[in-house]
Structures are given as C-alpha cells and as structure tokens.
Image: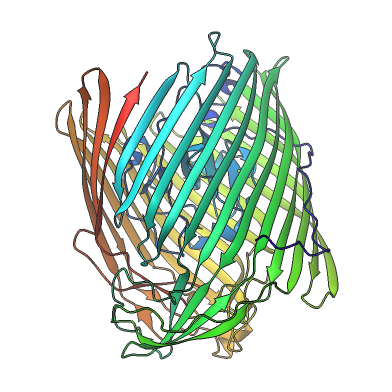
Amino acid sequence: MRRARPSHVALTAPFVVFLIPTPSAAQTQTGLTAQVSAPLSTQVAAPVQQQTESRPPAPPVVPQTQTQGSATAQASDAFGERVGIEQIGLYGEGQVRGFDLQASGAYRIDGHYFARASALPDAVASGVGVRVGVTAAALDLPSPSGVVVYRLRDPGVRRRGEISLGVRDYETYFVEGLGSWVSEDGKVGVVADVLARPRAAWAVGTSGQAFNAGAVGKWLPDQQTRVRAFAALYHRDYDGDFGIRASEDMAPPHAAQLVNFSPEWAGYEAKDLNFGLLADRRFGKGWTLDLSAVRSMHLSERADFTLLSVDRSGDASATLLYSAPRDIVSDSAEARLAKVFTTGALDHRISISARGRRSRTETVKSVAFDAGLLNITEDRAAPGAPPSLPTGGVYGEDAVDQITGSIGYGLVWNDKVQLRLGAHRTRYDKAVTAFGGARSERREESWLYNASLVWALNERFSVFASYVTGLEETGTAPSTAVNRNEVLPPVEATQFEAGLRYALTDTLTLIGAAFDVSKPTNGLRANGVYGPVGEVRHRGVEASLTGRVGEDTNIVLGAVRLDPEVSGPLVDQGLVGAVAPGLSELTATMSVEHRLNSTWSVDGAVTYNSERQANTRNSFTTPAQTLTNLGARARFTMGDTPVTFRFYGSNIFNASGYWASGSEILWPVAPRTWRASLTFSFG
C-alpha cells in the first residue's frame, strides 16, 4: 500500500522557460547554414530496441548486441554508443573520462535539455551516444565531463510491426512488440514498444520480473515544424540488492557466481516514468525556435540493500538496510532561439536561451537489520530471519531550482574554421529539510563559459581545442555511507582539451585528444560520511579508430590512458590516497563485425581494464580484467516474413574477480552468459 506523502513534500507540474537552440552533432558537422535547410519531414524510422538494465556501477561495458541494430556498424567513434542492449566504446551513460554522469546530469534528448530522475528507456529511445572531443566541441552547451544524448524513436514513413522473443542473459525470457502507425499524408505518426520479462535475472544473482512500455508521437503541421510527445514506463520487482566491502586491506576471495546474498525476505520494487513534449520550428530567414518540457520520475516502493563486510577467507557479516518508499521527481524545460545568416565567406549563428529545472528528492532514514553470517564462496543467502519492518518512514526533502540564461555565437569560415563561444549565467537554489524538520536554504549564482575551435587543415585533417566550465550535481551518498541517500551540493568543473581528427580513408576515421578535467571530489571519509575529500584532476589521452575496412567489415577501436589524481588536506594528512578509487588508468576496446554473406554476419569484442584502487586510502587494488564476447546474426525470410536470428555470448572465457568502485563497494565481474532471439518483421 502506498503511504501518504509527508506534508512538506509537494510535487510540481512541469514549467516552461525560454532558451537557445542546440543542434545535434550531426547538424553542426555540416556547417551552420545546413541547420535550417532540410525539411523536418525527411526523418527515417528507427529499428526495434530492447531494454538495458540500470544495475550497480560497473566498468565500460563489453559490447552486447541486440536482435536488430548493430552499434558497431552505427558508431561514428569509439567514445560510446548504445543501440538497445548493444553497448560499445570506452564510455557509457554512467561514466565518461572517469566522472560519474549519473550525478553530473549532462543529458540531452535530441539536443533538448533533460534533467533526469531516471534514465530514458529503450521503449522510446532508439539509441544513446556519448559526446566528447570534436563532437562535444560542436554543441551549444557542452559539459566538462561530456554529454550523453538520447535519440527518440521515430514512427517512420510507413506502418510496420515487429515481434521479438527469446532468451537474454542468465536465462531471462522475454517477448517484445513494436508497432508504428502513420497517417496517409505522413503528417501524424505514433510508434509504441512493449517489453515483458516475466522471469528476469541479472549478473549479480538477483532475479524477479520487469516490464517496459512507451510511445512516441509526432505531428508535422508543415515542412518547417515538428511537434513530438513521448511517455515511458519501466517497472521492476526483484529480490533485493547487495554489495561487498572488504573488511581488510585486500580483496576477498571470488564470490560464488549468480548468488544473491541478500536474505530471502529482501526485496526491491520501483517504477521509472518519463513524459515529454518537444517542438521545433524553422521560420523566416534563418530562424529556429525549439521548446521542450520533460518530467522524469523515480518512484521507489522498496529498496533493500544488503551490505556484506567480508574478510580474506570470505567470511561475511550481513547488514540489511531497509528504506521506506520514496520519490524523486525532476522537471526540466527550455526554449531556444537562434538566427543563422551569411556575410561573404562567413556563416554566423547567434543564439539566446534560458533553461530551468525543478527537482524534488525525498530523503528517507534507513533502518539497519542484522542479516546474519555467511561465506561468499558458498551458494547460500544471508540467514537473517524476517524482522518486523516499519510501517512508515522518517522523511526529509532535498529541493533544487535552477535557472540558466545563455548567449552564444558561432562562426564558420569557408567550411575550414568553426568557432563557438558561449556565456551562461546560472542561479542555483537549494533547500534541505532534515529528518527532524529543520530547514536550510542556500543560493549560488555564477558565470559559466565555453569556447571551442575546429580548424580543417585540408579535406581529411582537422584539429580542435575547447575550454568549458560547468556546474555539476554530485548525486547522493551511497548505501555504504553513514549519510546514505544524502543529496550532495553541486561543484564547478573545468575542462581543457585539444585533439585531431584524420580521415585515413573515405570510410575510416582516426580521432585523438588530450584532456584535463578538474573539480572538487567526494569520497568515503574515515568517519563513514560520504562527502568532499579534496580536488580531483583527470588528465589523459584518448584515441578512436572507427569505420569500415573493405566492403564487409566494420571496426571500432579505442583506448584511453587516464591519470586520476586527488589532492587536498586529507591527502596531505595521509587519510586519503592520491589516486581516485574505482578507475582504470588504461582502458582499451576492440569491436569487429564481419559480413560473411547476404545472410550471416559474425562479430566479437575484447575489452581490457587495468587494475583499480579499491578504496580512498589506496591500500589495495583489484586486478586487471580482460573480457571477450562473440556472436552471430542471420537475416532471412520465412515465407514473406523477414526474420532476424541473433546469438551472443558474453565473457566467454568466464573471467572472474571484482570491479572496484568510487563508493568502495566491490562488484563481482559478470560471469559467462549467452542470449538468443528471433525477430519477425511485418509491414
């Protein structure tokens, strides 16, 4: 039964403010004039997608291919691309250049501002891309840590349908249906997707059920106007989460695979809801106007988390942290106005903007229960007996209101030089209601800036440089901290970057960059409180080689060398180490897809992550990991029905061990698994 909301919590309706147009990366790469030239009705349909789970923090994911789409074939670089459950590249939605984007909030939906409380699911998203380097330099409002861009599904130009069914990782059975309807004149269309997993299982041993549904509608009143609306639901219900923390300065023995060490009475149930309205209008001579309003919600009914304190022999004491139901609601809106014009050999773009967000996060005091003793090398859950759970909870609230006004200028000279400048004035209001009812407020106002330059030396070779400052959220304290779920104050980050892009052939591109990103950092202090521990500076070099080799082979190769340095008084006193925990200094990835004939293709991926510091004290590390995947895809017909068969094996050599994280939790490496599916297309 849903409990009554505390009297101090108020959900607010989406609000609208005004701001500058932010073109997509694809638009900006073709010059400023192209942004207002193509009619909006020339969009194509997106392939069927499948849901990827938001599980505990993990390293860059080894590519995982869904039934229809191929991220290897679609990727323009090696910095991060996801199509359905296929993930390739060095970075993902949660981590870019060693920084946690789940907390920093640098997200967009087709270029529109998105302050998310929950991820946009694949029921409405056709794919996700990570923008850093030369692609980030082309954005109106880049972020120091990078930007994640969701791409909405499109109904396409004809009515169609698809049904997929099969087995996913760890014997997760699923059935998915996708359908689109388009009016005879092509001006109105709807695409909808439903995914059911009556038995869902995850790599850490948890199991339950999950359901996704969503729809995107599109209206084209004329050739220069597009209005879109979307709604999405993701519901999951399973047997609780757990995390492992070393009680000594060494990694515990490998945990038994696919075992949920939570007590049998533990549980987790939550719903993610996302709703939005986006409008784009081109008018007059070079004018564009974009408007958007999005509501994102995470509604948690129960979120049991079992913390295991484990010694060198694998013996563990289990503590279950019970949290009463709580809600997170985030509204974001923007309006963007821009003018593109030409003077001689120069194309200009002037923009003004304002964007705003309103976030309300319920904080709830966790209740700890002794869940007993166990050994993680054995196939046995924590033995703790079911306690008498609280019927309510002790609540607080964290409220954030932020408004940002921006002005930008862009210039392109003879398609050789592209310059972008931006200035942003932001006001950040934060009000915290403590568990006892005490209320505190704070306001911060600051100027933020961005500048980037791209210089094409010839048709194949270009260099770029950028400077960005940004105000970034730092998220909430993790489940392992004394101040669990406390919302942390924002920090100001700064990024310098320089790089190059070289087209080796017409189908193969090399990108390289050196970057320097710095900002205050949080960590687990000696007293168990998660909060500021100093300054973190991530310097590194990254490279990407992506494209087609011959007629039948696509490759995505990437590597990043990272120096995650921590400094500050706690480091000087020896309480905190000089290297940020949970980060590999070297990460390399290789994805290859080869077409054998008109029916069959094969693909594979190898990802290497070097060792990681396991805690803020830098007292021990988790070993390096190399993971290998192999798969195959076949496209054929049964009668008149097109069919796609997909088989994929992940971690085929069954590498084991732990991934260290910034919260000092050790996550077991996902064991070997496989998936197989059939997709039938109609229309």
State how many labels appear. Answer: 0
- In the picture, the quarter occupied by the N terminus is bottom right
Corner quadrant of residue 243: bottom left
Residue 666, quarter of picture: bottom left
Q: Which residue sits at x=51%, y=44%?
A: 121
Residue 156 in view: yes
The quarter of the picture where the C terminus appears is top left
Residue drawn where x is 62% and y is 13% of the image: 223
In the rendered view, does 602 fall on the left or right side of 208?
Answer: left
> Where is 381 relative to 509, above or below?
below
Q: For this view, does 90 lie left or right of residue 351? A: left
Q: 583 above or below 327?
A: below
In the displayed orientation, state which residue is furthest to the top: 185
Q: Check the image and name the residue furthest to the left.
A: 596
Which residue: 35% across, 63% down?
203
> In the rendered image of this protein, does residue 676 appear above or below residue 475?
above
Q: Nearer the viewer, residue 369 or 410?
A: 369
Spot occupied by residue 69 in the image (x, y as percentages of width and height): 35, 35
Residue 472 visible, this orientation: no
Q: Is residue 137 above or below residue 97?
A: above
In the foreground, 490 or 50: 50
- Where residue 348 appears, as percent x and y from the top left, is 67, 26
